[in-house]
Image: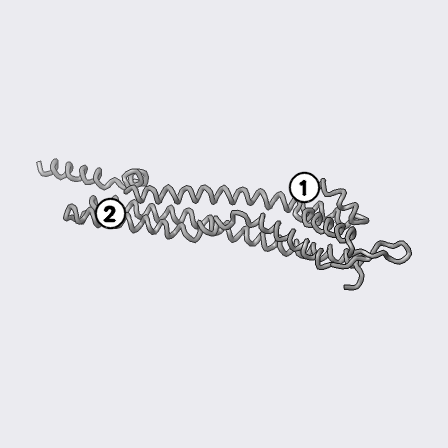
Amino acid sequence: MINILWAATTESAAVAVDTSAWTAITSANIVVQLTLVLLVVMSILSWAIMLAKRKEFQKSEEANNPFMESFWKADSLDDIFEQLGDHPDSSFARVFRSGYMELRKIADSKLAKGGDQGSAPLLSGIDNLERALRKAIDKELGQLEGRLSFLATTGSTSPFIGLFGTVWGIMGSFQAIGATGMASLAVVAPGIAEALIATGVGLFAAIPATVGYNHYVAHVRKQEIELNSFASDFLNIAKRNFFGDN
């Protein structure tokens, strides 16, 4: 008889302390559940952004190499401009377009003066060309940096959001102890389980977002260096061929 009662008690306790992840989530407090939903949504958006950025950077890098080959092989800036349609995804090509259009505006303005013996006119106002290139580079970098701030936000806030769910779950355990007057495993386990799940989901959202943010920021900085180098080359060509002493 004693063995039967002991077995029944053990079976009842086993049912009472079922703390599987799904059970902990479905039986969690509504505040903890909303916290988990928020973290899952942030994680999904972070992964979507990282995959989109990977495709964007890959497309840009693959398009820049052919344009640079064409740029250095061309005989004139006009020839390069006519070939821009072949490089629609190149960030270098877009910067070149801005610089070329500004160069034409300067040539058509009062800043141009005739050269000697029918040579190309000498231009002044190179500051305008430098500003146009700088503006084009800033636009390209702004596009590359787009949505990366969300990754930074997810990486920095998700652990604290998860911690909020953790604190709320532990509070639930203390409330259960106060209501029952007992501190048994069956009383505190559900609250502790949902608290730990909130912590884990917070880290699951934060770690990939932080890694992705650092990875793509490094790519943006690399792209910035390359764009500035290209702009310098463009300016040197323009100075040698079109501008007088400034």
Task: Characterize the local packing of mark 2: few (<14), some (14-19) or many (20 or more) Cα atoms within 10 angstroms.
Answer: many
Q: Residue 124 carries which label?
A: none
Q: Is mark 2 on a helix, strand or loop?
A: helix
Which one is in front, 214 or 228? 228
The residue most toward the bottom is: 246
Q: Is residue 165 left or right of residue 139?
A: left
Q: Which mark is residue 172?
A: 2
Task: Determine the residue positioned at 28% across, 49% down.
Answer: 168
The residue most toward the left is: 1
Task: Determine the residue positioned at 42% across, 47% down.
Answer: 205
Q: In this view, does 37 lie to the left or right of 168?
A: right
The residue most toward the right is: 117
In this figure, which residue is indicated by the disc labeled 1?
88
Count the marks. Answer: 2
Where does the N terminus fall, quadrant-wise? top left
User: What residue type is disc 2 on?
Assistant: Gly
Q: Position of residue 230 (x, y in %)?
A: 69, 54
Q: Where is residue 60 in the image (x, y as percent from the top left)?
A: 63, 45
Q: What element carries label 1?
A: loop
Q: Is residue 106 above or below residue 16?
A: below
Where does the C terminus fall, quadrant-wise? bottom right
Q: Is residue 24 left or right of residue 234?
A: left
User: What residue type is disc 1 on?
Assistant: Pro
Counting residues from the start of the chain, the first of labels 2 and 1 encountered is 1
Q: How far apart are marks 2 and 1 (CA)?
A: 57 Å
Q: In this view, does 238 lie to the left or right of 40?
A: right
Task: Determine the residue positioned at 78% across, 55% down.
Answer: 110
Q: Position of residue 217 (x, y in %)?
A: 55, 53
